[in-house]
Image (tube, helix red, strand yellow):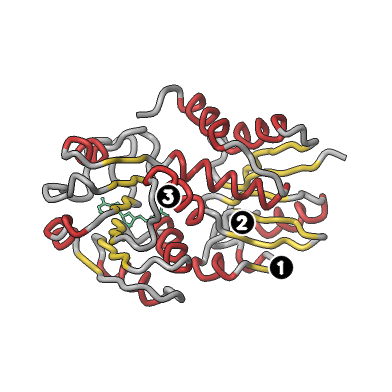
Amino acid sequence: MKKLYGVIGDPIAHSMSPAMHNDAFAALGLDAHYQPFHITREDLPVAIAGMKVIGVAGFNVTVPHKTAILPLLDEIDPLAAAIGAVNTVVNEKGKFIGYNTDGEGFIRGLHEEYGKPVLDKHILIIGAGGAARAIYYTLSQQGAVHVDIANRTLDNAQQLKARCPYPVNTAILTMEEAEAKLAEYDIIIQTTSIGMSPKVEDLPLRLSTIRTDAFLSDIIYNPFETAIMKEAKQRGARVQNGLRMFVYQGALAFEKWTGKLADPDRMEKIVIDKLGGKTC
Ligand code: ATR
């Protein structure tokens, strides 16, 4: 019987996950379908109960349900519990198990493009929201040694650090402090919404002292090249946008559901086509 997968969120109409996963099912000859489900906050509990009764084999979770879903699941992977957010649910013999593949997806994409191990590098994360938490906790869990955090609201960054269950050396910085010591970092990870369409000219901080051998990874992929990526490139650094993170969080979910590896390049092509162009 055809297996049913999907993504729940509100809004959900513009999700690129259905095209990406349905293509991967077809490419691997799997009898499965991936469906977007528009689920409001108030309908979340009944939706989860319904998906279980129907026997949905697995699903992704997006805004605004990544945290609200935790108490509705049967089990939560320890990393997802630490992050406090689930983006992937697997139906294991009738039990819904929650995972978070955002941080691991980011690290896979970073490692691939960076071309060298990243965990021993001096890393700066800009931002302290949900995406930063997934990346920071996953980096720490995997053994990163030095990851500083710069954020507009210092208290949010302090809390991120204080609640991290894995050991890591971290300084909390204002944006100005981070600008002043930017030359110390091998890898800079931009996780705020600054630079996202439509305010594409905005920068979270200036890169006047970025090293030419530094690497800047922005998790935004719309636009493909943010203002901070442009500035980093102009100063001789290498850059990456958020496409690979998006692709790998999906590929990792796909692997958890099917036990099979999806082709990340094929997945990325689908996303680029849906976004209507070529990446930088
Ligand atoms: P996400 O889940 O996508 O990470 P989020 O949890 O809302 O989104 O986090 C947004 C991040 O972007 C935060 O670090 C936020 O800074 P604050 O903690 O100070 O709110 C940052 N951010 C968003 N808009 C910003 C702006 N205009 N200037 C500086 N930081 C901004």
**Disc 3 element:** helix
* Residue indicated by mark 2: 42
Instruction: Tell me: 115 left or right of 273.
Output: left
Q: Position of residue 43 (x, y in %)?
A: 65, 54
Residue occupying image coordinates x 48% and y 50%? 108
Residue occupying image coordinates x 21% and y 44%? 203
Which amino acid type corresponds to the residue marked 2 in the rendered image? Answer: Glu
Residue at disc 2, CB closer than 8 Å to ligand 1? no
Give neighbour class at mark 2: few <14, some 14-19, many 20+ (Cα, 10 Å): few
Q: CB of mark 1 within 8 Å of CB of mark 3?
A: no
Give neighbour class at mark 3: few <14, some 14-19, many 20+ (Cα, 10 Å): few
Q: Position of residue 72 (x, y in %)?
A: 67, 65
Residue at disc 1, CB closer than 8 Å to ligand 1? no
Instruction: Tell me: 3 left or right of 64.
Output: right
User: Which of pointers 1 and 2 lies earlier in the amino acid sequence?
Assistant: 2
Mark 1 vs mark 3: in front = 3
**Disc 2 element:** loop
Q: Quadrant of residue 149?
A: bottom left
User: Which of pointers 1 and 3 lies earlier in the amino acid sequence?
Assistant: 1
Mark 1 vs mark 2: in front = 1
Residue occupying image coordinates x 55% and y 65%? 80
